[in-house]
Amino acid sequence: MSETSPRLFVVSPHFDDAVFSCGALLATHPDAVVCTVFAAAPEPDMQTEWDRKAGFASAHESVNARTLEDNRALELLDAVPVRMPFRDSQYLDSPSISKLAAALEETIYRSTANTLVMPLGLHHADHALVYDACCEILPRLSHLTWFAYEDAIHRRQPGVVEARLEDLAQRGILATPAHPSVDHRIDAERQAFLKREAVYAYESQLRAFGPHGYEDVFRAEHYWQLSVSRAAGRRSTHAR
């Protein structure tokens, strides 16, 4: 990878979200980090409705299989998996925003990334929690380049993208439509092929969504560059 290319760090609430939402982008950035937040199995074991739809008899079986699916998908995209020890909301053990933010900030700090890509946090409670944590971190790591991505599948809900952009503005975070830089040696056709192959690696999740429930992942990816507004920066300075 060229020394001038940005090292991407993509925050993925669940195992599949980064590929579903940013797979084409990841295809142009070998060695990007994909950090899955909710990657741990519950204790004790259980079975949820979603895991049952995905074909699993238990949560432990689900997390083990989904980790292997994620490994295959990220290998196709030459991405580096990083997994955090949190459990998603279906396992009834969600972290607080502050606990998640502290752990995520430390993980980012230890990486060599200079470009962060976070979810807009649309519709799903886990996605919203990751969004809130990222918004808490952003002002402290504003020397990095930040982007937000539309959460594939969840972006279909009417008005959710607009509501999130309004929320960013209220937080003093400027969101400008923009696309992270890409390696133009990998053309759009190749990007689409690699993303499609990576998406299909998540067999269990596609089974749960149903044959027409995941078509949205193949729509165009949308991004916003994020920055802390001057007014928000002044408020933060005065607060100290």
Image: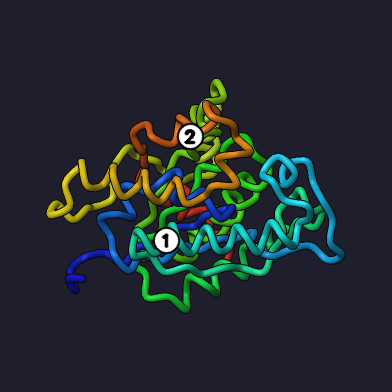
* Quadrant of the snapshot with the N terminus: bottom left
Label 2 sits on what residue type?
Answer: Leu
Left or right of 160 in this view: 89: right
Q: Is residue 74 above or below residue 55?
A: below
Figure colour scheme: rainbow
Neighbor class of circle 1 (other Cα within 10 Å; few <14, some 14-19, many 20+) is many
Tell me which residue sits at (64%, 59%) in the image.
38
Tell me which residue sits at (54%, 29%) in the image.
211
The residue where tag 1 is placed is: 74
- The answer to which image quadrant residue 221 occupies is top left
Q: Are marks 2 and 1 in contact (CB under 8 Å)?
A: no
Neighbor class of circle 2 (other Cα within 10 Å; few <14, some 14-19, many 20+) is some
Q: SS of the residue at dot 2?
A: helix
Left or right of 3 in this view: 205: right
**x, y (%) of residue 34?**
45, 62
**x, y (%) of residue 169?**
48, 38
The residue where tag 2 is placed is: 165
Q: Nearer the viewer, residue 94 or 152?
A: 152
Tell me which residue sits at (60%, 35%) in the image.
209
Q: Nearer the viewer, residue 48 or 85?
A: 48
Q: SS of the residue at dot 1?
A: helix
**x, y (%) of residue 22?**
39, 47
Label 1 sits on what residue type?
Answer: Leu
Mark count: 2
Left or right of 31 in this view: 141: right
